[in-house]
Amino acid sequence: MPKPTLTGEPQPPEDAAAQETLQARGPLPEHVAIIMDGNGRWAEEQDEVRAFGHREGVRSVRDITEACAQLGIPHLTLYTFSTENWERPDWEVNALMGLLVKTVRKERERLLENGVCLRTLGDTSELPSACRRELEEAADVTAANERLTLSLALSYSGRWDLVEAAREIARRARAGDLASEEVDDALVGSLLSTGALPDPDLLIRTGGEQRLSNFLLWEMAYAEMRFTERYWPAFRRTQLYEAVRDFQDRDRRFGRVATGNQAARRDGPPARREEKATPA
């Protein structure tokens, strides 16, 4: 049965059927994280400027967000802008920040109407004030939405996140509010900017590279990873469905003896599911 779309356009029956097949085939990932790579290279192959690739990449963001919401995947995290990206030429950084403001402003009402909660990860204090303002307003108006949590990693670094958590632990210890034996996986995880989210089940990286690039370093401990040569502007829901099918075919053992996909996926990583649910 066709489902609501972010654009208001009718969902093609064949797409609804593809989603129903995936839903019946096996468990879906609870949290998909994507490293959106290749915008600039895609644009260059089209004989266009790099900014054109970033603009076209927004179309993929919209399509993948909509597909995840329709499938029933409750969490989607997109690596939108890393701390290393600040080293790019000023004109490109400015273009990216301008595109971010324009996109968030344009999509805010659609997100609200379609049950998507927008949140950010990373050191957003480094973003231009216009970006922070748009993101904060969008986060406020969509905070109660529960259909899908869309997290944008902005000015984000996995190492930065871990250092910030370590600083908070040190601060609590100095204040006498934390004993060394109280420091465990659950505490560290709760102090990360992803503390309210489950760990990713599936990581997708577009653009042909096969590395994490400082993304969700702690949280990727048990994630299944899929790398594709496709550049991000050419990655759409068809490729997402392929990644989900691949995920469903994986034997996720989490370090245990193989007992079958269904049991491992149901139980999750050892002593992590409950810890995430009860942060200190």
Image (tube, rainbow, N blue to C red):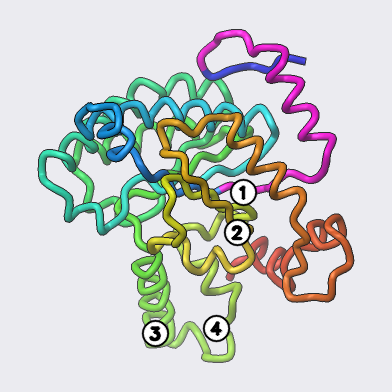
Q: Earlier in the sequence, mark 4 or mark 2?
A: 4
Task: Please say if the residues under marks 4 and 3 sit with CB atoms less than 8 Å apart.
Answer: no
Please tell me in which quadrant of the rendered image residue 239 appears.
Answer: top right
Please name the residue that numbered disc 3 is placed on: 175
Given residues 191 and 280, the one toward you in this image is: 191
Secondary structure of residue under mark 3: loop
Secondary structure of residue under mark 1: strand
Near mark 1 (Cα within 10 A), the count class, few <14, some 14-19 or many ≥20, is: many
Looking at the image, residue 30 sits to the left or right of residue 171; the answer is right
**Above or below for 12 versus 56:** above
Q: Which mark is residue 31?
A: 1
Magenta region includes residue 31: yes
Amino acid at dot 3 = Ala
Amino acid at dot 2 = Asp
Eye-nearest disc, 1 or 4: 1
Q: CA distance from mark 2 to mark 3?
A: 30 Å
Residue 31 appears anywhere in the view: yes
Please name the residue that numbered disc 2 is placed on: 199
Identified at 47% across, 67% down, the residue is 217
Q: Earlier in the sequence, mark 3 or mark 1?
A: 1
Please name the residue that numbered disc 4 is placed on: 183
Identified at 53% across, 60% down, the residue is 195
Identified at 61% across, 52% down, the residue is 202
Given residues 238 and 66, the one toward you in this image is: 238
| Residue at the limit of the structure toward the bottom, as seen here | 180
Part of the protein shown in magenta: 7-32
Magenta region includes residue 75: no
Position of the N terminus by quadrant: top right
Given residues 257 and 220, the one toward you in this image is: 257
Task: Please say if the residues under marks 1 and 2 sit with CB atoms less than 8 Å apart.
Answer: yes
Q: Position of residue 32 (x, y in %)?
A: 58, 47
